[in-house]
Image (cartoon, helix red, strand yellow):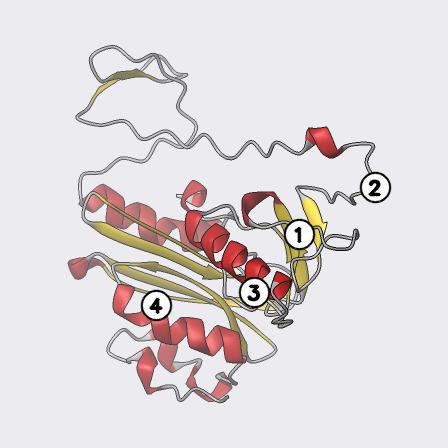
Amino acid sequence: IARLTPHRPDAASASGPKRLFEEASTEPRPTAEFEREYLEVVTQGMRQIFCDAILVGVGIDRRISFLEGSDIMLGEKGIQVNEFLETNIEDIFAAGDVAEFYDVVRETRHVDGNWTSAFLQGRHAGRVMAGERTTYKNVSSYSITNFGFQISALGELRLREGVRAVVRSRPAKFQYERFLIRCNTLEGAFLINCFSDKQHLTRLIETRTPISEYEDKLQDFPFDVKEIPVVE
């Protein structure tokens, strides 16, 4: 289940979605090593699994090695750009999964490896080139729908010092939500079959709306997150 998110959740939080998948007769195998033959999977433990479909997470191979030794500054995972998507060289920009950009929402530098972010960054870089000098501001998100599950990951999902997780689940409807809270504001959220909450949670993350008075309510599924007013 941890492979469904950019960062590994703690064991207690991971058990919630794992149970939902098992009850829906979907068995995740994140470390399986297999040979393909008529949709048959052979795991590292030599277990044979016959299935209708195989999903393989291959990750991202960023082709930036050709820039090594150039004057363009590289980061740990990509080409370093600022909040305007500019490199350290005037009039050279980077966008998409090769751009290690400064995120003004998270206040940190990272990469976003998905199509939506690539489109938004490319469009924003074009506008800056055309003279519209505004910062790139977007809450990172990943979404996928498979086996009847709508899965979304929003914002920062790392459980680190100063961050606490609030979890709620409704197994009868295969619903699960995990909220990451830091300094009384929502920093990230992981959703299963709660797509209607995505837009409002994104706004709460983007605006850093204080949510301390609603934290206890977030543990209870009858509570609608859209009752938390967005503070601009």
The residue pinned by badge 4 equals: 198
Question: Alpha-carbon neighbours of circle 4 within 10 Å: few (<14), some, or many (≥20)?
Answer: many
Q: Amino acid at mark 4?
A: Lys
In this rendering, position of residue 227 left or right of residue 111: left
Q: Are marks 3 and 2 in contact (CB under 8 Å)?
A: no
Q: Amino acid at mark 1?
A: Phe
User: CA gap, disc 2 to disc 4?
Assistant: 40 Å
The residue pinned by badge 1 equals: 93
Q: Amino acid at mark 3?
A: Arg
Q: Nearer the viewer, mark 4 or mark 1?
A: 1
Q: Residue at x 23, y 50 (%)?
A: 149
Marks 4 and 1, the one that precedes in the sequence: 1
Asked if residue 160 is positioned above or below residue 199 in the image, the reply reads above
User: CA gap, disc 3 to disc 2?
Assistant: 24 Å
Q: Nearer the viewer, mark 3 or mark 2?
A: 3
Marks 1 and 3, the one that precedes in the sequence: 1
Marks 3 and 4, the one that precedes in the sequence: 3
Marks 1 and 2, the one that precedes in the sequence: 2
Q: Residue at x 78, y 55 (%)?
A: 90
Determine the secondary structure under disc 2. Answer: loop
The residue pinned by badge 2 equals: 71
Nearer to me, 122 or 18: 122
In this rendering, position of residue 106 left or right of residue 47: right
Q: Quadrant of the N terminus?
A: top left
Determine the secondary structure under disc 3. Answer: helix
Marks 2 and 4, the one that precedes in the sequence: 2
User: CA gap, disc 4 to disc 1?
Assistant: 30 Å
The residue pinned by badge 3 equals: 127
Q: Are marks 2 and 4 in contact (CB under 8 Å)?
A: no
